[in-house]
Image (tube, rainbow, N blue to C red):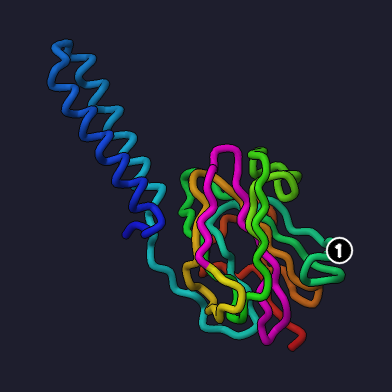
Amino acid sequence: MFTKYGYHTIGVVTIISFLLITLSFFIHNLPGKISVIFIAAAILLLTLNFFRDPERTTPDKKNIIVSPADGKVLFVKKIQDDKFVNGEAYQISVFMSPLDVHVNRIPISGKVELLNYYEGKNVAAFEDKSSLLNERMEIGITSPQGKIFFTQVAGFVARRIVNKLKAGDEVKAGERFGMIKFGSRSDIIVSSSWTPMVKKDEHVTAGETILFELTSR
């Protein structure tokens, strides 16, 4: 299954690959012919791999926040948030390599209260400063369990953030809402009343891995 957010790119790459393979028929040098065919096939396979969109099963459990992105946990730390959570908070950052699934999913059921888009640079997404310098979309959701603030941050390779949310939308945990094309990062910020359930360097799965639990309720 492939994400609808990649249909245009897949179509363009398929045409380019077809043209390259057609061109190879006019190359009489065998090594050159094989090289062109290999490059065309590799480009197409890498594109299809990037835009894959497997089904996910979100845990049927209350008082949890699931990961909005596939990838490796860069860090888990305490911060002071003044954008949406407003107060002492935990931040978990997830780095998505080009080999990870890049479709993003809603981390908790609730109402979209905040959407801010910022143009920016393309610092490598694993750099901490990328959260402030890079192109990004900020999202705030109010749920019965409280507020959650998370981001889509474009990386060094990424050049387009896809986000279909609108302010006022009622959303459900695990739903697809967008993606970041070709390498990226997501920061998730919640109040300190939540308990982090993952550690640095763990690999998490969008819509399935539990990042936080609210154990006090």
Q: Relative to residue 82, is residue 156 drawn left or right?
A: left
Q: Residue at x 63, y 78 (%)?
A: 64
Q: Quadrant of residue 159?
A: top right
Label 1 SS: strand
Residue 141 part of the magenta segment: yes
Q: Closer to the camera, 87 or 138? A: 138
Q: Percent position (x, y) of residue 95? A: 61, 50
Q: Closer to the camera, 23 or 87? A: 23
Q: Closer to the camera, 46 or 136? A: 136
Instruction: Please name the residue that numbered disc 1 is placed on.
Output: 80
Q: Is residue 95 above or below residue 149?
A: above
Q: Closer to the camera, 118 or 59? A: 118
Q: Residue at x 31, y 60 (%)?
A: 1
Magenta residues (range): 139-164
Q: Relative to residue 86, is residue 101 drawn left or right?
A: left
Q: Percent position (x, y) of residue 84? A: 77, 70
Q: Residue furthest top?
A: 29
